[in-house]
Amino acid sequence: MKAALDALKSAESAAVKENADLKTRLSQALISAEQSDAELKAALDRDAQLTGRPFERRPRKSPLDRKLRIAGMMDEFTTACFALECEFLPLDPARWHDQLIDFAPDVVFIESAWHGNGGLWHLKVSSVSTELEGVLRWCKVSGTPSILWNKEDPVHFSAFLDVAARVNVVFTTDIDCIPAYKHHLGHDRVYVLPFAAQPAIHNPVEVYDRKDAFNFAGSYYLRYPQRQRDIRTLIDTLAELKPVEIYDRNFEKGHPHYKYPDEYKSLILGSLPFSEIDKAYKGYNYGINMNTIKQSQTMFARRVFELMASNTVVVSNFSRGVRMLFGDLVICSDNADQIKARLAPIVDDGTHYRKFRLQALRKVMSEHTYRSRLTYVMSKVVSDYVPRETPRIAVLAVARDAAARDYLLKLWKSQTFDQGHLFLLCSDRPDDAEFGSDVSVFAEADMLTAALSEHSAEFVGLMSAADHYGPNYLTDLALAERYSAADGFGKVAHFAKTEDGIALHAADAAYRPAQAIELRAGILRRTLLSDALLAKCLSEPESAAISGQPVLALDEFNYCRNATTVEASQITDDAASRSRGISLDEIWDTAEGLPAGLPRPHPGTRDLPSITVRQLPSYIATAHSEPVSVTTTPSRLVVTSKLQSGKYKYLWTKRKFPRDEINLVDDSKISFDLESTAQECHFVCEFYDAQDQKISHSMLTKGGTHSLALPNECTNVRFGTRVSGQGIVEISGLSFGTPGDVPPVVFGRSDTLVLTQQYPAYDDVYRYGFLHNRLRGYCQAGLETDIFRLNVRTPRTYDELESFDIASGDAILLDATLATGRYKHALVHFLDARMWRVLSNTWTRSA
């Protein structure tokens, strides 16, 4: 032991001159030292001071040509998604030290996990257990970056704040929490990281015959009345169009808080383990999503990403985050008529349905995969992380005359894919022609072959002058590599020109393994391009094909055989979509620039029903001579207990409160502060029916905001405090309802902001209806706008009306939003002094 301690002290001394040596020697000393030794702990405490320098990104430990090594603690779903992108080591609280020494991770990843690694870390993360402290101390000593991803924001921001204060870098699913993190932590290493899809699990490859029905794979929560109403709206509305089926995560578990009402029993098929989620995600044409958090700009259910990646049309209750990230690619509304109006063309037209879901699939695979998320994480943690890039594609084409050459070049320039290179064989090349850096034109096949051999493309394909290729043809082929390891991808299902017009062929082949792919409608891995096949591509491009290899057929769109663009594009190319959501790069850029600051309470919070400290004593029955007495201060109800250890007493309100009197009909939130030095203390809520019979109760051990599991038959609520042993309990007043915060800024999809005092709503369509009609006209003319309602009396920050998104707030929020520089134009309806002050301030700032 003495030798180990001497090594630590020596390392500490050397740290003053050389920080790198400190970490190496301390790590070595930890191997042999007894961690329980007090002297060792003191030495490590001194080390904590020595290494308390600003975090700096450093090179990763593992070789760049190997997968990242990540150790940590995650819940089941997150582990399944991230572990496929790295070498992941689930830490065991009983042997974490040996694991870390042996594994030498590049980063330690801590998720806001309630259970973590199969239950091993149950409540050990949020409580910052001794084991977690040890892991983070090891990170500091060894120079290993540590991160927290709080996927529970904004609801459980406080629960994981202590962990956030101990790690190097923090990521959150809710962008609106970033300023508060920066304020509490005192640094700017806080970033937004939304949920995503894991293409190896969530992908369009068909495994079932899909039911033409809606499916919801999710739970019922008694403590969320708004969610209950939204479920009812969706199920009742969708049942008018197609059958609805449910997989209940808590099926037959018996807990009354998670039991679906009896009226839904006939819809419930049972439960699904995570390993069988494909049955819900790929077994139906339509998936239902339910968001509990609806006002966050980036936090919403991960089910949305997973369903879209599974090529399933998503229908959801309203969520500002869904609307921001995906726009009209998700049917997202709380209004039944709007849901039916959006779904009508999709359920009535199979081609429209398939085009719609293809756009959603492309969006998720392009921006919202866990590979993309890990790339962003590592860019903030290490200095030399090289992300896995989109595969490059070499496209061969043969033009037999000038018209074919020009047609092929036009098709090429229309492609949205930016990692391709066109190798065009054309004897009729103008001497002064400039085709761009992504086009090479050759007069001889040998010259083309030689140039191709020097190119670094991973895939090779063909374009035929006889066919039409839509703008996203290559993009969709390239994205397939993210969810399939097949050797080739192509349009086995495809449109072709016939005597009767444009017709779809082999429709059932889409997203299924295929026997062969013609290269005029597909790509194959470069390693499979033999000399003979290359020669055929250049001599007989229309008949070159690959067979005998594992290949995957994709969708039928953005391609038509034996047809020109004029003939085919309307049928084969993407359907028009007003909004496909904001780019995640834009969100990241803005998020990183958000300043530190505490959230401002929404003005509507001041109007929430409450029971004040002054009112509480009149509701509580107790005598001063009892072992438990009650007094008040200006801000607290003080309960003093002289009970013996193990003895307890309830203090109840004299009356029961009707739910509608305290805002617990459409809401379930109760907020209060609670501090106690007693042996034990609970705040108790009892629920009674119309016959004054007790149904159930909730016992709360901490202050804060809580969601009560109010039974549907509950009409009245009684409150009380259960105190045990000696001590003092202090309780603030009670408030009822969801205490909202004003976001730091409002995100939008346009560079044009419509500023107004009012805007119509589904239940008030005529008030300012002319303005809504005007904006619809803007949209039809091609002008996309964002809407800001300068009105503090609006109860919610975000709403939507017929797919138009409305943000509401005060002048401070408007000023902060304009200060981001996103908006280049403001269209003002009924300019007033408040608007002018903010707008003139923005113009002055940008001048």
Image: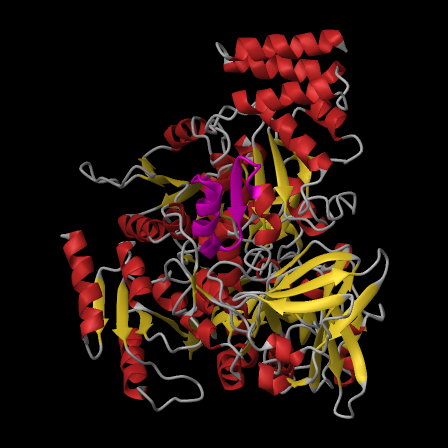
Q: Is residue 378 left or right of residue 829?
A: right
| Residue 284, above or below 377 | below
Q: Nearer the viewer, residue 416 or 714?
A: 714
Residue 698 sits in which quadrant? bottom right
- Side of 847 where 661 appears, left or right: right
Q: Is residue 186 above or below residue 250?
A: above
Q: Is residue 452 visible?
A: yes
Q: Report the front residue among 237 and 383.
A: 383
Q: Identify the residue at horizontal 49%, vertical 24% (top origin).
A: 58
Q: Nearer the viewer, residue 1 or 365?
A: 1
Q: Residue at x 30, y 37 (%)?
A: 437
Q: Which residue lies at the image location 64% right of the left edge and 21% below the top edge?
A: 44
Residue bounds of the magenta highlight: 164-190
Q: Residue 523, relative to residue 96: is it above or below?
A: below
Q: Nearer the viewer, residue 808 or 509?
A: 808
Is 436 one of the magenta-colored residues?
Answer: no
Left/right placement of residue 501 relative to residue 354 reads left
The answer to whether residue 496 is visible is: no
Q: Position of residue 375 (x, y in %)?
A: 51, 39
Image coloring type: secondary structure
Direction front: furthest residue: 625
In magenta stretch: residue 168: yes
Residue 531 appears at what percent x and percent y?
A: 53, 31
Residue 397, placed above or below residue 350: above
Q: Position of residue 451 (x, y in %)?
A: 39, 28
- Locate the N terminus by quadrant: top right
Number of numbered discs overlaid on the protein picture: 0
